[in-house]
């Protein structure tokens, strides 16, 4: 509705499409861009058709997605900031879409600020972000926000089944992903299954009242390994840019690679904890005779076994403690100490 009204009244120069991954931001941005270009073209239908193709051959639609964990600074400068100064190749409008805008480094965001403040009249920018809090306030405040809600689990499940996936694991992944189709697909991969197994192992150790250090240490090591892979791939991409002539100091290169690694490590650790919290939530549901609301639909027998004689309030409190630890990690506390403290707190609550 908001985008239809914008097209009718005349689109703004900049938008921020914000909402969880898989909520339809990308599809909506492509359709919105196509309508902007069609309205300014001599042949509206042809302009719309080409803009809707993915990838699009329309010369006035620039779509920028990060090649790795981050957008490359020079690519943002060349393909968006400098390109925005050139008049349209055809028609009367140019549209620039920056996917995963939160993956722009501060340097890129600051450079983009002037374009957002004083864009040519024929330019429209659309930033897509699943983590708008990671954007500079000066960037977000200069864009008209368009909010996207998470898809219902049924819609995610239907999309997964269209790809030929079957079984209760699909239903579980759709519910655990909280409306994020990409995350649901990750949970169905080998890496995702490993994450789920690690979360269940951590919860089981806490329920058994034993030493849970080995389980949370394994979760942390897995996240660290993913972070190291992201750091290496980012460093390789930056090295390629440097060889191609992009000026960048060795220190800048190393810092960018380390940031990408930390980000990936944090993402995977947070996901592991989210899956742990979901397990305790499901235990509380099973212990309260509400198995129909469980997320881990493919693990009901295991949940019923662990939920025997379990106080539902204790399970709910355990889930709250895990969520509290996720918030603490956002404050850059020591991951190892936070997980160790969580282990002790869970043991106390679960008795």
Image (cartoon, rainbow, N blue to C red):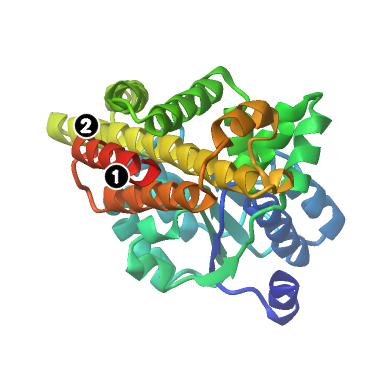
1 above or below 89? below
Q: Earlier in the sequence, mark 2 or mark 1?
A: 2
Question: What is the C-alpha distance between the residues marked 2 and 1?
Answer: 40 Å
Mark 1 surroundings: few (<14), some (14-19) or many (≥20) residues within 10 A = some
Q: Residue at 33% x, 25% y: name it.
A: 244
* Disc 2 versus disc 1: nearer the observer: 1
Dot 1 falls on a residue whose secondary structure is helix
Q: Which residue is mark 2?
A: 253
Q: Is residue 82 left or right of residue 16?
A: left
Q: Is the N terminus in the top left, top right, bottom left or bottom right quadrant?
A: bottom right
Dot 2 falls on a residue whose secondary structure is helix
Q: Is residue 165 left or right of residue 71?
A: right
Q: Which residue is mark 1?
A: 345
Seen from the viewer's position, the closer of residues 71 and 185 is 185
126 above or below 275? below
9 above or below 257? below
Q: Residue at 79% x, 53% y: name it.
A: 48
């Amino acid at each position: 509705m908001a985008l239809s009204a914008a097209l009718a009244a005349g689109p703004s120069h900049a938008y921020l499409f914000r909402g969880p991954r898989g909520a339809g931001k990308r599809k909506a941005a492509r359709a919105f861009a196509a309508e902007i270009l069609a309205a300014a073209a001599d042949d509206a239908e042809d302009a719309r058709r080409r803009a809707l193709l993915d990838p699009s051959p329309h010369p006035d639609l620039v779509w920028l997605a990060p090649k790795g964990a981050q957008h490359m600074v020079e690519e943002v400068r060349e393909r968006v900031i400098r390109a925005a100064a050139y008049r349209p190749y055809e028609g009367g409008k140019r549209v620039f879409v920056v996917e995963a805008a939160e993956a722009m480094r501060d340097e890129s965001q600051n450079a983009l600020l002037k374009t957002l403040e004083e864009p040519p009249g024929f330019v429209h920018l659309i930033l897509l972000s699943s983590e708008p809090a990671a954007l500079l306030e000066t960037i977000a405040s200069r864009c008209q926000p368009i909010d996207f809600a998470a898809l219902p689990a049924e819609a995610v499940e239907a999309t997964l089944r269209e790809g030929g996936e079957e079984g209760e694991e699909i239903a579980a992944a759709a519910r655990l992903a909280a409306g994020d189709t990409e995350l649901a697909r990750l949970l169905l991969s080998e890496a995702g299954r490993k994450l789920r197994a690690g979360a269940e192992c951590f919860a089981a150790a806490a329920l058994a009242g034993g030493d849970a250090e080995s389980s949370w240490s394994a979760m942390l090591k897995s996240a660290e390994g993913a972070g190291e892979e992201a750091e290496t791939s980012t460093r390789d991409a930056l090295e390629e840019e440097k060889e191609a002539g992009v000026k960048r100091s060795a220190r800048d290169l190393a810092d960018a690679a380390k940031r990408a690694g930390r980000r990936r490590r944090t993402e995977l650790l947070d996901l592991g904890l989210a899956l742990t919290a979901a397990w305790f939530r499901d235990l509380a549901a099973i212990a309260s005779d509400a198995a129909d609301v469980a997320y881990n639909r493919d693990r009901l027998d295991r949940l019923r076994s662990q939920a025997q004689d379990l106080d539902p309030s204790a399970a709910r409190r355990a889930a709250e403690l895990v969520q509290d630890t996720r918030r603490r990690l956002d404050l850059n506390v020591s991951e190892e100490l936070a997980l160790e403290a969580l282990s002790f707190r869970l043991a106390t609550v679960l008795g």
